[in-house]
């Protein structure tokens, strides 16, 4: 009697997930050397086939321009030979990182003589849903391979040709290195139905990680029956305390906001203690003007803008909750540190908040009261990043509190299991 595999009746998306599940089982016990060899093969293949990738990307870029996509988004979409080489270099960096799989998180010999160890193991099949940044295709695949996971990649339709070319190169390199090519797959389909199927592939997909704007993340968190690690939007705050050094505060503010605006760790709101506002705000507004930043100001900030070159508009309630990802910042004067904390608690996305102060007491109180993934003292919000934290790379920045929080490096792409070793032990 012939037993039919459930694969035969599955949709293309579920078939891909089924194949990924088999690949994940092969990857899980592999030694580090096998995974590193595959990653180095991927890096070499990206460089050798860069022209193929750039040619496919040019079609996506042309289509985006025809559709009137902003230049900022087009820049994020664009791949050049130099950018492909940089992506290949990042893959080599991932290969050089320690392998988290098999690491003993804790262990002991119990009083009854049983040896107990908690060790890191891969998550299994990781689905990544992301918007128009084709570099994420390679970054996610490299991190998942290094941590022993199979990956299902669902990028936006705007980067479909780019992602198709990249995944073709990745699969050829991975398969050529002796690992299952199905460890890296592009989710079939360009429409929303394929995303919905991926979100419902519980039992085949172990976890979904969305990367993108608030709308994408909220949709997946609310509709997915597959467990989701929420990589959050970044409504990040800079609070300038009464005891701040003015030069330091201006430099941190401008760096947090304007060093790179289209990223989740850029500052979106400025809060200024009323005692320092007369000395600080005129300088801050001029510095923001020089950086090309428009200030969405409350009435108290407006009062300091009369003689400034800054572009200032009246803030609305929406401004306090907005992740601009542009040369815009909301700004308000607050009566105290506690009022600043109240504002942050009300409007934050839980990503990163910074305080600028020379007062250790104020710094301690702020770090105790603010509950975000990262709280910075006299440092730019732009440091919330796996690379900046010394993790080598990250899959995203989790703003939830379960399993992983903050920049997610290789250890966060693992779970754990317990290994119990006895000598004929039975429970009495």
Image: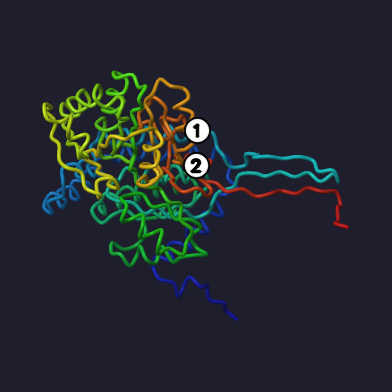
Q: Position of residue 71 (x, y in %)?
A: 16, 42
The quadrant of the picture occupied by the C terminus is bottom right
Dividing the picture into quadrants, the one containing residue 79 is top left
Please provide percent x and percent y for residue 381. 36, 32
Q: Say what secondary structure mark 2 lies in.
A: helix
Nearest the viewer among 190 and 2 is 190
Instruction: Judge from the rendering whether residue 364 lies leftward or rightward of residue 112; answer left or right.
Output: left
At numbered mark 1, what does the secondary structure look like: helix, strand or loop? loop
Of residues 125 and 217, the one nearer the viewer is: 217
Q: How is the image coloured?
A: rainbow
Whichever of callouts 1 and 2 sits on the residue coming sooner in the sequence is: 1
Check the image and report above or below for 253 versus 407: above
Can you say whether 6 is above or below 376 in the image?
below
- Total tally of numbered discs in the picture: 2
Quarter of the N terminus within the rendering? bottom right
- Find residue 97 and name its label: 1
Q: Residue at x 36, y 57 (%)?
A: 218
Residue matched to label 2: 146
């Amino acid at each position: 009697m012939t037993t039919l595999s459930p694969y035969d009746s599955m949709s293309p998306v579920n078939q891909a997930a089924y194949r990924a599940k088999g690949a994940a089982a092969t990857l899980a016990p592999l030694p580090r050397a096998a995974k590193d060899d595959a990653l180095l093969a991927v890096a070499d293949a990206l460089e050798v086939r860069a022209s193929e990738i750039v040619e496919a990307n040019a079609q996506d870029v042309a289509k985006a321009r025809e559709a009137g996509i902003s230049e900022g988004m087009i820049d994020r979409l664009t791949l050049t030979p130099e950018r492909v080489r940089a992506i290949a270099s990042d893959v080599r960096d991932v290969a050089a990182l320690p392998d988290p799989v098999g690491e003993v998180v804790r262990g002991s010999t119990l009083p009854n003589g049983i040896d107990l160890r908690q060790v890191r193991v891969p998550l299994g099949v990781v689905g990544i849903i992301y918007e128009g940044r084709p570099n994420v295709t390679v970054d996610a695949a490299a991190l998942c391979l290094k941590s022993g996971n199979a990956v299902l990649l669902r990028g936006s339709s705007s980067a479909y040709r780019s992602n198709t070319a990249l995944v073709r190169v990745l699969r050829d390199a991975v398969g050529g290195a002796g690992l299952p090519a199905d460890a890296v797959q592009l989710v079939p389909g360009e429409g929303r139905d394929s995303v919905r199927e991926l979100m419902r592939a519980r039992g085949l997909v172990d976890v979904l990680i969305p990367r993108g704007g608030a709308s994408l993340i909220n949709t997946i968190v609310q509709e997915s029956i597959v467990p989701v690690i929420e990589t959050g939007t970044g409504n990040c705050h800079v609070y300038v305390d009464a005891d701040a050094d003015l030069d330091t505060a201006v430099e941190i503010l401008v760096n947090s906001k304007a060093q790179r605006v289209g990223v989740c760790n850029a500052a979106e709101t400025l809060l200024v203690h009323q005692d320092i506002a007369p000395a600080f705000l005129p300088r801050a507004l001029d510095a923001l003007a020089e950086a090309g930043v428009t200030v969405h100001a409350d009435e108290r900030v407006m009062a300091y803008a009369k003689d400034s070159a800054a572009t200032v508009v009246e803030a609305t309630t929406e401004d306090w909750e907005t992740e601009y990802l542009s040369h815009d910042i909301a700004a308000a004067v607050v009566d105290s540190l506690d009022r600043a904390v109240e504002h942050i608690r009300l409007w934050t996305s839980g990503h990163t908040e910074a305080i600028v102060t020379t007062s250790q007491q104020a710094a301690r109180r702020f770090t105790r009261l603010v509950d975000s993934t990262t709280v910075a003292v006299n440092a730019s919000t732009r440091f919330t990043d796996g690379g900046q934290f010394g993790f080598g790379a990250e899959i995203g920045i989790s703003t939830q509190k379960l399993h992983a929080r903050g920049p997610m490096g290789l250890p966060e792409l693992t779970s754990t299991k317990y290994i119990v070793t006895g000598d004929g032990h039975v429970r009495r």
